Amino acid sequence: MDPQSLALPPTVRTPRLRTVAELLKPITWFPPMWAFTCGVVASGQSFADNWSLLVLGLVLTGPLVCASSQAVNDWFDRHVDAINEPHRPIPSGRMPGRWGLGIAIAWTLLSLAWATLMGPWGFAACALAIAFSWAYSMPPIRLKNNGWFGNAACALSYEGLAWITGAAVMLGGVWPGAHTLTLALLYSFGAHGIMTLNDFKAIEGDRQMGVASLPVQLGAVRAAQVACLMMWLPQAVVAVLLWQWALPWHSAAVLILSLLQWPLMARFIQQPIARALHVSAFGVPLFVSGMMVSAWGLRQLHHTGML
């Protein structure tokens, strides 16, 4: 079903500002902004001396790069959304013609222009994130068509790349080191599981449109088990590493936060479609809290001269 063929009131020629905001999905901006902040914290650098970089980075990762990726995804997913979420701006007709594509391109260019203010590291990270977002949604690459590859691209962009960028720009472009890289990649692995949570609401449309999300590939229960394992395992590894790095209190906090997710995950596995949103609402905040605890642990190592 082509959403452009949906009935459209003849008076609708341009979308309202609230429709544009809905397309850009502000609720999704939090994860990369949080990961960038984790990188800033983990760098060990002064917040007061680098507040402008912090502000520039938060605007870049959330309202610009993440927002552009949402617009790109909505445009190329308009046929799937016509089945799964017909109320979305494009399939509903509230975003007429090619406005969705135009906004996606404009926000992409704006993101790249803004990234020039953050030096070579910031621009390179922005360009890579933008490349991932277009490859995720746009044919013929369309990584989204395979849940393993698509979720990996999102997880790396939203968590790992944003974390490394936050640390690197605060360090003036210096490589942030093995500890930061390790934690960023581990939490990216965990974010793969988080991305899978979003796929349970779209199983029917994905199946009809040939999108092989993990729930489509593995079935709802098996996909829920995989998502939970991918979320919890890296948190356990982080707790072990923090202990080895002489950060016992940070290690204990990360472990406790991960164990608090178990009851939510158990109920999710029993009722994956009904409980996916519940895990997102209550389990993911525990996950990202562990990220920040880990970042403060690295900051302590910097200040004590152990990094």
Image (cartoon, rainbow, N blue to C red):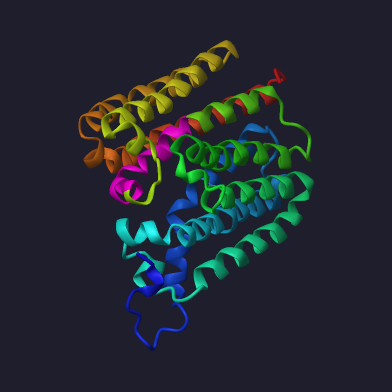
Residues 66 and 289: in front is 66
The residue lying at 76 percent from left, 56 percent from top is 116
Q: From the image, which quarter does the C terminus lie in?
A: top right
Q: From the image, which quarter does the N terminus lie in?
A: bottom left
Q: Is residue 110 above or below residue 247?
A: below
Magenta stretch: includes residue 292: no
User: In the displayed structure, does residue 265 sit left or right of residue 131?
Assistant: left
Q: Is residue 68 above or below residue 189?
A: below
Residue 115: x %, y % from top left? 71, 54
Residue 149: x %, y % from top left? 51, 37
Residue 11: x %, y % from top left? 39, 88
User: In the displayed structure, does residue 273 sit left or right of residue 9?
Assistant: left
Q: Work out whether residue 234 can be spotted.
A: yes
Q: Is residue 187 above or below residue 94?
A: above
- Total labels: the figure holds 0
Q: Which residues are magenta?
A: 190-207
The residue lying at 72 percent from left, 38 percent from top is 168
The residue lying at 48 percent from left, 39 percent from top is 151
Residue 14: x %, y % from top left? 47, 81
Q: Mostly what secondary structure, the magenta segment? A: helix
User: In the displayed structure, does residue 171 sit left or right of residue 269?
Assistant: right
